[in-house]
Image: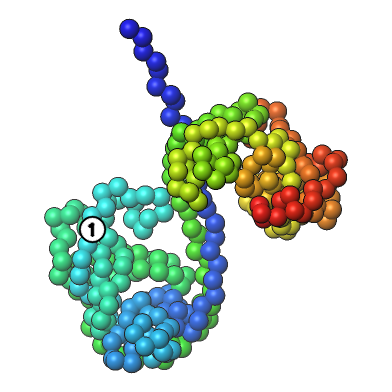
Amino acid sequence: MTSSAAPEVLRAPLVVEFPFTRSLGPVQSAFLTGLRERTVLGVRTGDGRVLVPPVEYDPVTAEEIRELVEVAPTGTVTTWAWNPTPRRDQPLDRPFAWVLVRLDGADTALLHVLDAPGPEAVRTGMRVRIRWAGERTGAITDIACFEPGEAEEEHQPGPHSGRFEDLVTGIVAPARLDYTYSPGRAQSAYISGLSARKTVGERCPSCQKVYVPPRGACPTCGLATHERVEVGPAGTVTTYCIVNIKAKNLDIEVPYVYAHIALDGAGLALHGRIGGIPYDQVRMGLRVEPVWSEGGRYPDHYRPTGEPDADYDTYKELI
């Protein structure tokens, strides 16, 4: 009796991270500046409801709304979920509850966190109050968290002008996604091929299109793909862009060219950087080949082969 070892399951940790920069209109500007000043503002809709956090357009009528209302720093938990294992950059570094809190004077609930010793201390309907951050900059994190209890001093909600000194007019919100990626059968074969400096796709049994990288199924026909086809190594630039902004942690001088490259025999184009030629000489139809760095598991970039440019009709369906 013989047995065969199970194929290695490939896994890789991946991080997608970028800063999201946006300007603020008059309502959001007043709301965030108010948090800096320990004031929570909502906005009144045409039917008299007060929305917190505020929006600039009525969700029912789509009319522009600008009437600001100050609400209380206390409220009622409408629903909650316990988080036993906080993640990176979450508001608290210890177990806490995610809560929706309807602040006194508001008709909608605000999502934030509640500092509680355990899930047994949290319930729908409990009264909570804002715990302000020691240093406030005009962001939702100026509310450090909610805590059980009532306000330390009486507060009367009412109309607010939205006027503050040194208004917050823009924010930069970092976005980050950490996850572990495990490719399936088709992409595992593709990655293994790259380690041998080969580019392997899979052919659809119906439309005969060769997908690179392979997806395990044809997105057009919906059929599983199994026939492996080696393509390239050379290919044709179909479209491209000139990159003028240097990316963090990427040791490539700008400007440089990033292109869609249709490898010979492939049914669609893949991405690749173009090198070995001035950026302003890259063009559609340029014939290129891969350049592998020593020990690299994928092409570092593509360079011109020296062949005549491809005729447009040979790659127009791959743009």
Residue closest to the far top: 1
- Amino acid type at circle 1 is Ala
User: From the viewer's perspective, is residue 201 above or below residue 40?
Assistant: above
Residue closest to the far front: 206
Frontmost residue, 223 versus 172: 223
Q: Write the residue at 19% across / 53% down.
A: 118
- Residue 310 appearing in the image: yes
Q: Write the residue at 75% across / 53% down.
A: 313
Frontmost residue, 210 versus 78: 210
Q: How many labels does the image show?
A: 1
Q: Write the residue at 55% across / 32% down.
A: 228
Q: Residue 58 lies in what quarter of the image?
A: bottom left
- 131 sits to left or right of 262: left
- 86 sits to left or right of 317: left
Q: Residues within 10 Å of mark 1 (few under 14, many from 20)?
A: some
Question: What's the colour scheme?
Answer: rainbow
What SS does tag 1 mark? Answer: strand
Quadrant of the rendering where the N terminus is positioned:
top left
At which x and y percent is residue 223? 45, 43
User: From the viewer's perspective, is residue 31 above or below residue 258?
Assistant: below
User: From the viewer's perspective, is residue 250 above or below residue 151?
Assistant: above
Q: Write the residue at 44% across / 70% down.
A: 139
Q: Give the residue number, with chain letter if any, for mark 1.
A: 81
Frontmost residue, 315 versus 307: 315
- Residue 160 appearing in the image: no
